[in-house]
Structure formats: structure tokens, C-alpha cells
Amino acid sequence: MTVRQNVPDPKWIKECLKEAADTLRRLPRAHAKPRLTGWPDVVRNSMIHEFAPGRTRRAAPSPAAIDRLDESLHWMFACNPEQRKIVWARACGVPWRKLEDIDGRSHVTLRRIEDQGLAAIGDRLRSRDANTGFNTPK
């Protein structure tokens, strides 16, 4: 059995990907302005709050969080497309049961695919760290 040196912990990778998914959700969306409307912007924007009481917009992510998002999304290229879908769905908080319904395979198989994807990301990070001398948290 070989022991991999300097491989980031899969839990750490999962947390980074969850933070990336949260950051992506908090980025402002690009909305097209309505073409034909007689209502001023102020009225339209105030009406949004009337129709959705209690709903507040989450704070925009910091520039550092956006940088971490960008880096974390590059990690996904270490996975094959099948692994990428499962790893990202889990980072976005999709429950195993819903993934089973969507994919048609058991949660045991899907967990194995997720583990393989996280291992591929860990291997990519390890090889990058060996080339650059950068130390990744364990």
C-alpha cells in the first residue's frame, strides 16, 4: 500500500468547493431590463420588496472569496465529466436521494464516484504543490 505524501484532506476539498458554490450563489445576477415599462426604476424596485416580504439579499462575496471560487472551479478539471457532476452537485448541497433519482444509480455508487473525483482533485493539488513548492493545508 502506498502512502500519498502532502495530499490535501478530502474534507478540506469539500469545504472549499462548498464555499465556492455559496460564493457563486451570492454573486449578483445579470438581469435584463424590461423593454417597455412606464414605471420608474424606484417604483419597480420597491414593489419587489412588497411582493417578497422577509426575503433579503445575502451579502455580496468578498474579492478574496471570488478568487478562491475561481481557483476551486479550476480544480474541477481534474475530474472526468461524470465525477465533476457528482462532486459539484454535492458541493451545491444536492442530497444523495435526489441524486439517486436524477442519476438512477445507488448512493453507494455515487459516493464512490464522488470519492474518486475528490481523490483526483487531491492528486492534482499534490502535483501542483510539488511543482511550485506551495503547501496546501492538510
Image: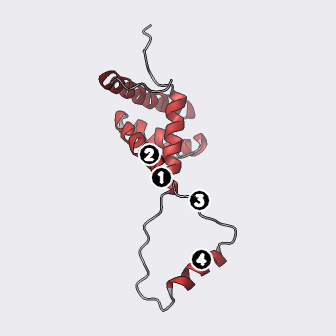
Residue 109 relative to residue 95: left or right: left
Number of numbered discs on residues: 4
Residue annotated with mark 1? 24
Q: Residue at x 39, y 41 (%)?
A: 71
Label 2 CA crowd tier, 10 Å (few <14, some 14–19, many 20+): many
Q: Earlier in the sequence, mark 1 or mark 4?
A: 1
| Label placed on residue 69 | 2
| Label placed on residue 58 | 3
Q: Residue at x 52, y 43 (%)?
A: 19
In space, the residues marked 1 and 4 are separated at their CA atoms by 22 Å
Q: Earlier in the sequence, mark 2 or mark 4?
A: 4
The residue type indicated by label 1 comes to: Leu
Q: Are marks 3 and 1 in contact (CB under 8 Å)?
A: no
User: Relative to 30, is 70 above or below?
Assistant: above
User: Relative to 18, is 125 above or below?
Assistant: above
List x then y, in percent, for residue 39. 51, 89
The residue type indicated by label 2 comes to: Leu
Residue annotated with mark 4? 48
The residue type indicated by label 4 comes to: Ile
The residue type indicated by label 3 comes to: Arg
Q: Earlier in the sequence, mark 2 or mark 1?
A: 1
Q: Are marks 1 and 4 in contact (CB under 8 Å)?
A: no
In space, the residues marked 2 and 1 are separated at their CA atoms by 7 Å
Q: Earlier in the sequence, mark 3 or mark 1?
A: 1
For the residue pair 90 and 68, the one nearer the viewer reads as: 68
List x then y, in percent, for residue 53. 69, 72
